[in-house]
Amino acid sequence: MISHGKEIKVFSGNSNIALARDICSELYMGLGNAAASQFADGECSISVYEPVRGKDVFIVQSTCNHVNDNLMELLIMIDAMRRASAGRVTAVIPYFGYARQDRKAKSRDPISAKLVANLITAAGADRVLTMDLHAAQIQGFFDIPVDNLAGANLFVKYFVKKFGKGNEDVMVVSPDVGSTARARAFSMKLGVNMAIVDKRRERANQSEVMNIIGNVEGKTCILLDDIVDTAGSLCGAAKAIKEIGGAKEVYACATHGVLSADSISRIDESCIQELLLLDTIPYPKDKPACSKIQYLTTAPVFAEAIRRIYEEVSISNMFD
């Protein structure tokens, strides 16, 4: 029962138009008519070419590279919808940039994730829909409702089809101690055991693998992470699993493929058989193709969440 009776509208910024179109396809509707461009001096310009008064508006925009431009597009589009008298505005942010700056790691550090949350709220968003926040507590940075979808279920379906459920020759491996809870939940859904890569991070984007906690010898290992940025940690963990742990082969999966710097060549040269990513971030246009990288679509998941939000029914079972 839809209590508010509003029409649903889905719009998109420039960061991930393909995903927005796929979401609309799942919802059997067209993408809203709007455009995001830049003035000569680089200022963001938003034009909305159809009425949104009283509508339930969803804006799909990942704050990925170029992060600041895409963030400004999102903020200004939210403001445009609010000033055009949209009934409700939901920011659909498949990848939430600045999420890794969620605490003060040293003196005088900013907490940029909180600042971005404040900006989105101040712009006029009524709620946020995202996937696999780097730190779940970021939901508490917002003063509006946040739905944080889980991407791991898509990987579970893929690997169950590939290896079967409860396969004793398969193990899930957490690339660091911080990802243990995520890996444990993933391994339970696959019905397999888990191991942990113990590492020490010397500086940003660099880490040194120290030890493997768990016996992975002769096993097919699945590394699970939330973000692949430079791929240094992931490839280092895969190397340790093979060389130190004696694993048979290594697969990897992650929700968000930032794929910056030399990540593609690093993945190509690694012992990883296949890297599975979700399409929360599109493949970088300036990077060469990589045969090891495969994508799964998140469109059905986001479309179902949008439908439930619109119909004002529970989406809690989507987190299971």
Image (cartoon, helix red, strand yellow):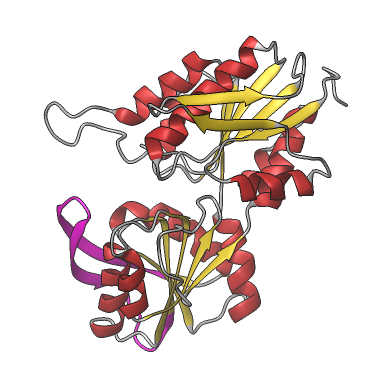
Q: Residue 201 magenta-drawn? A: yes
Point 18% across, 36% down: residue: 105
Point 56% across, 70% down: residue: 191
On the picture, is 253 further left or further right than 165?
left
Magenta part of the protein: which range? Answer: 194-220
Q: Quadrant of residue 177?
A: bottom left
Above or below for 73 versus 144? below
Above or below for 167 versus 118? below
| Viewer-closest of 283 and 319 | 283
| Viewer-closest of 211 and 222 | 222
Q: Quadrant of the N terminus?
A: top right
**Visible residue check, residue 20:** yes
SS majority, magenta: strand
Residue 305 horizontal/vertical position (percent): 69, 40
Q: Residue 269 magenta-drawn? A: no
Above or below for 248 versus 57? below
* Count of marks placed on residues: 0
Residue 46 horizontal/vertical position (percent): 57, 25
Q: Residue placed farthest to the front in the image?
A: 40
On the picture, is 22 further left or further right than 94?
right
**Visible residue check, residue 320:** no
Q: Quadrant of residue 227?
A: bottom left
On the picture, is 177 further left or further right than 209?
right
On the picture, is 266 further left or further right than 304?
left
Point 23% across, 64% down: residue: 198
Point 40% across, 45% down: residue: 65
Residue 230 horizontal/vertical position (percent): 30, 59
Residue 152 horizontal/vertical position (percent): 55, 57
